[in-house]
Image (tube, helix red, strand yellow):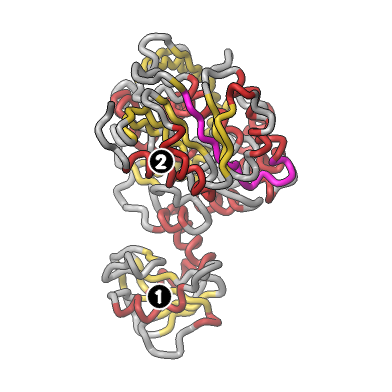
């Protein structure tokens, strides 16, 4: 429960108007605000929440947190005036997490964060109430907003932390003060905002800056940066747990040929076999991270194995659809939500290993990987080696950056190049054949999700 006095103290603000109490949520969006909520007027690049303060009160907000320079002239309702409303949101979230008894797990990394969050949350739900930031609410607004609305009955809090510039993970770690900090991997992503991958690494390592005493770090043993990550983590954490396929990982991943989706984890000498819904590599890593976190909390994951086995990859993040496009039955691997070199290589591997009786040909539709700065050409062209060592039969490229890959593809792999998603859409009926296993992968701004949508919305009867 919040009141004028406690809110004023939390955000170091000046309370204006009558006293109030609230059992509602913290809201930044009048479209989802409910009566009894507290409205925080956030200023963004394309909007200013202060324009919606009157609407918030008309919908039942009991108070609004506003910038002291943007206090409404009209008497709309009780206000808390602060120097910076985003900082106020962070302060609210910090206090809420400070007061919880729940174990807090922070997840960051260049790829696999969201899938790991959902796999881990599903497993932990077998042992207690789990609260997590949904979808991609992992930035300086989304994660604090979810943390600010943490329920009192939560026993585990799983927080995904994204970033595209230095200092952002530090700010999120300051709010969370995690008991366990996970780095899924480190690779070239958001390089427009960093000088090198080492800069990305430094930003990810900020997750350890504000961990609790006795915290545990969970690190990718297979990463080329493992030694550097471990060295920093040891300065902040009481214990390190590693995961990966490499010999020496605390949680080691073993794959079995049959069934193809079967993964065995050897966790500190004990084995756990999981028959997963997908053979995707990133899913095996997410399960290994889940086992590592379970071990950190002395949890026997046998009971949670069912939750891990039932997990289905998310739309845009490796979900497999068996569908019929224009009467042609295909298997669609939807990985179109986003892309960087790490996740693109994993997707290529997943298509190569796609084990489905109906797949006769493997087709990759690959869109630009954005925000790679001056290294863009190098990273796009660098995909060739992985493709050449895969079972992929034909590659179609989309976008100006992907021309670097298309230009070096051997003739037998060249399907064609499209300027953008619209041109790709126009040619889908020509390039898709019955029995195709189709991967669609690219950065969010390439809009290849519309290609996936089109493939799924033209189901007609299969031949």
Residue 368: within the magenta? yes
Q: Is residue 272 visible?
A: no
Dot 2 or dot 1: first in sequence order is 1
Residue at 65% x, 39% y is 403
Q: Nearer the viewer, residue 348 or 187?
A: 348
Q: Position of residue 149 (x, y in %)?
A: 37, 57
Left or right of residue 382: residue 74: left
The answer to which image quadrant residue 183 occupies is: top right
What span is colored magenta in the figure?
A: 362-376
Of all residues, the one furthest to the front in this rendering is: 430
Residue 161: within the magenta? no
Count the labels in the image.
Answer: 2
Vertical placement of residue 284 versus 132, above or below: above
Inter-mark Cα distance, 2 to 1: 41 Å
For mark 1, does the 10 Å Cα neighbourhood hold few (<14), some (14 to 19), or many (20 or more) residues? many
Q: Position of residue 64 (x, y in %)?
A: 40, 75
Q: Position of residue 279 (x, y in %)?
A: 42, 22
For mark 2, does the 10 Å Cα neighbourhood hold few (<14), some (14 to 19), or many (20 or more) residues? many
On-image quarter of the N terminus = bottom left
Q: SS class of the residue under badge 2?
A: helix
Query: CB atoms at circles 2 and 1 under 8 Å apart?
Result: no
Left or right of residue 291: residue 151: left
Residue at 48% x, 83% y is 71
Residue at 44% x, 80% y is 15
Residue under label 2: 452
Q: SS class of the residue under badge 1?
A: strand
Q: Is residue 68 visible?
A: yes
Q: Given this view, does label 2 or label 1 mark the residue nearer the observer?
A: 2
Residue under label 1: 64
Vertical placement of residue 251 versus 124, above or below: above
């Amino acid at each position: 429960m919040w009141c004028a006095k406690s809110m004023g103290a939390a955000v170091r603000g000046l309370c204006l108007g009558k006293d109030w109490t609230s059992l509602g949520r913290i809201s930044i969006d009048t479209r989802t605000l409910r009566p009894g909520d507290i409205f925080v007027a956030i200023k963004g690049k394309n909007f200013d929440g202060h324009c919606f303060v009157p609407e918030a009160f008309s919908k039942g907000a009991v108070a609004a947190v506003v910038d002291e320079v943007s206090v409404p002239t009209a008497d709309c309702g009780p206000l808390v005036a602060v120097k910076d409303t985003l900082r106020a949101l962070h302060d609210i979230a910090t206090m809420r997490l400070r007061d919880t008894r729940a174990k807090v797990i922070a997840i960051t990394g260049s790829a696999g964060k969201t899938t790991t969050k959902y796999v881990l949350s599903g497993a932990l739900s077998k042992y207690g109430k789990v609260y997590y930031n949904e979808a991609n609410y992992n930035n300086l607004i989304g994660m604090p907003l979810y943390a600010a609305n943490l329920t009192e009955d939560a026993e585990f809090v799983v927080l995904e932390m994204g970033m595209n510039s230095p200092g952002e993970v530090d700010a999120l770690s300051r709010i969370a003060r995690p008991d366990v900090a996970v780095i899924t991997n480190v690779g070239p992503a958001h390089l427009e905002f960093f000088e090198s991958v080492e800069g990305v690494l430094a930003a990810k390592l900020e997750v350890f800056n504000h961990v609790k005493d006795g915290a545990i770090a969970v690190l990718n043993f297979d990463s080329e940066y493992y030694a550097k990550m471990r060295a920093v983590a040891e300065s902040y954490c009481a214990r390190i747990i590693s995961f990966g396929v490499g010999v020496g990982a605390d949680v080691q991943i073993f794959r079995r040929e049959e069934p193809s989706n079967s993964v065995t984890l050897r966790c500190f000498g004990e084995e756990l076999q999981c028959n997963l819904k997908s053979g995707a590599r990133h899913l095996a890593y997410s399960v290994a991270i889940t086992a590592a976190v379970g071990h950190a909390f002395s949890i026997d994951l046998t009971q949670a194995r069912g939750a891990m086995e039932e997990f289905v990859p998310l739309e845009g993040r490796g979900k497999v659809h068996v569908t019929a496009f224009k009467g042609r039955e295909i298997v669609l691997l939807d990985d179109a939500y986003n892309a960087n070199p790490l996740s693109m290589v994993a997707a290529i591997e997943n298509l190569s290993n796609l084990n489905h009786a109906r797949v006769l040909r493997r087709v990759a539709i690959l869109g630009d990987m954005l925000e790679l700065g001056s290294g863009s050409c190098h990273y796009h062209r660098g995909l060739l080696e992985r493709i050449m060592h895969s079972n992929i039969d034909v590659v179609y490229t989309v976008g100006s950056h992907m021309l670097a890959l298309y230009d070096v593809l051997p003739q037998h792999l060249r399907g064609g190049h499209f300027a953008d998603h619209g041109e790709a859409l126009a040619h889908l009926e020509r390039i898709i054949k019955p029995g195709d296993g189709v991967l669609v992968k690219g950065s969010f701004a390439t809009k290849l999700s519309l290609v996936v949508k089109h493939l799924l919305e033209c189901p007609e009867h299969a031949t």
